Amino acid sequence: MKPAGIYIHIPFCRSRCSYCDFATGMYSADLAERYVLSLAKEIATFEPPANEPEVDTIYFGGGTPSLLTPGQLETLLNAVHQRFAISATPEVTIEINPGSAALETLRIVRGLGFNRASFGVQTFDDQELARLGRSHGAEDARRTFRHLRNSGWDNVSFDLIAGLPGQTMAGWRRNLDEAFELRPEHLSFYLLEVHQGTPLATHIKNGLQPKPDEDLAAEMYEVMLDRAAAAGYEHYEISNLCLPGLHSRHNSKYWTAAPYYGFGCSAHSYDGELRRWANERGVVQYMEMIEVGRSVIVDETRLSAADRQAEAVFLGLRMMQGFSFAEYRNTFGADLREKYEQDLTRFREAGLIECNDDLLKLTRAGALLSNEVFAAFV
Ligand code: SF4
């Protein structure tokens, strides 16, 4: 069994961004305190899977985990350490919202054992940030990055979003100039998705904001990858870049069928074999269920052999290094080339994939149209 990851969901934010459809709500100190107690109880009473593996990554995501106090973060880390066998060199990540953590707080949090920080810059353009309803400005992001460096964080990731309403290629190039000048160890890069029911979707529908230009966003993706390669970054996953060797060990578990256990409302888990499950999404409902000793699992899936084979391909293909035909044969006793011969031929002719003797890989064009490729394997 591969080592496992732990994900802890902190569902609080200071305000709601206009494009967000995550399970998160408004922060209040009382709610956060009650939620941390519930989380600690859920972790302590987690039922061990058979042959429970060692844990080598812990990830605090949200929401905005940096809204918790250092004492609350420590409570949760202690709960994880008491319940699980942790490797000697775990990757321990916390997501931080720019402007939400002071220098001294970052220093204390680093001292608790967190060794990787991830924060959502999204863009260095204040007007674009305002249109997204983000609570921070570009200067907050720059200051947060400086604070992280000055308080000992040497593994920092940040996110950028391309294809924002009204964003130009010139504006995008300015974002990239600034991002690569800061030189974080890791960069995540997303094309804006407009989710139904979000304020952004309503603004676009009512003509208050321009519709994102998908062709321009695709060009932005290409420009980003060229700049990243020139700056020495490795494009290791469709949406992720890193300096050599500094990929996200935690997120890589999601693409390589490793086990991960999620805690908190809306958290998802996988036992690394046949079982996936998901927790109650509502914060208050989640806490009430924990407080009366009820299970918070509201959805559970047993994977069939066909499900596992399909997942292995469409998750594994997210990794730009490619997916091994031999590994597929060894794991599932089937020949991937034969099974999907027609689809593989079609995608190769369309320039979406490349194959050699052992590897099946997405091309850059394939990475942009990955959902079309993945659909063939589902
Ligand atoms: S900070 Fe992140 S989780 Fe919170 S509202 Fe904005 S996009 Fe959503």
Image (tube, rainbow, N blue to C red):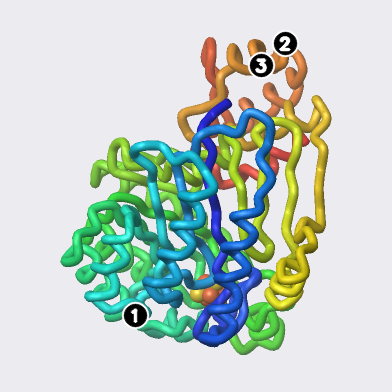
**Rendered image: mark on residue 333:** 2
Instruction: Quote the CA–CA distance across marks 2 and 1.
Output: 52 Å
Q: Which amino acid is tagged 1?
A: Gly
Q: Position of residue 68 (x, y in %)?
A: 45, 75
Q: Are marks 2 and 3 in contact (CB under 8 Å)?
A: yes
Confirm or reject: label 1 Cβ below 8 Å from ligand 1: no
Q: Position of residue 33 (x, y in %)?
A: 54, 79
Residue sitting at x 27%, y 68%: 108
Instruction: Quote the CA–CA distance across marks 3 and 1.
Output: 46 Å
State the SS at label 1.
loop
Q: Position of residue 250 (x, y in %)?
A: 47, 45
State the SS at label 3.
helix
In the depicted structure, whether residue 375 falls above or below residue 342 = below
Task: Classify 10 Å Cα crowding around label 3: few (below 14), some (14-19), many (20 and above).
Answer: few
In the depicted structure, whether residue 124 falls above or below residue 115 = below
* Residue denoted by label 1: 99
Instruction: Quote the CA–CA distance across marks 2 and 3.
Output: 6 Å
Q: Which amino acid is tagged 3?
A: Thr
Residue sitting at x 68%, y 70%: 195
For the image, the number of numbered tags is: 3
Front residue (pair 298, 349): 298
**Rendered image: mark on residue 163:** none
* Residue denoted by label 3: 331
Q: Which amino acid is tagged 2?
A: Gly
Residue 86 occupies quadrant: top left
Task: Classify 10 Å Cα crowding around label 1: few (below 14), some (14-19), many (20 and above).
Answer: some
Judged from this view, the residue extending furthest toward the left is: 150
Nearer-N-terminus badge (3/1): 1
Front residue (pair 332, 35): 35
State the SS at label 2.
loop
Residue 256 occupies quadrant: top right
Specify whether 170 is left or right of 73. Answer: left
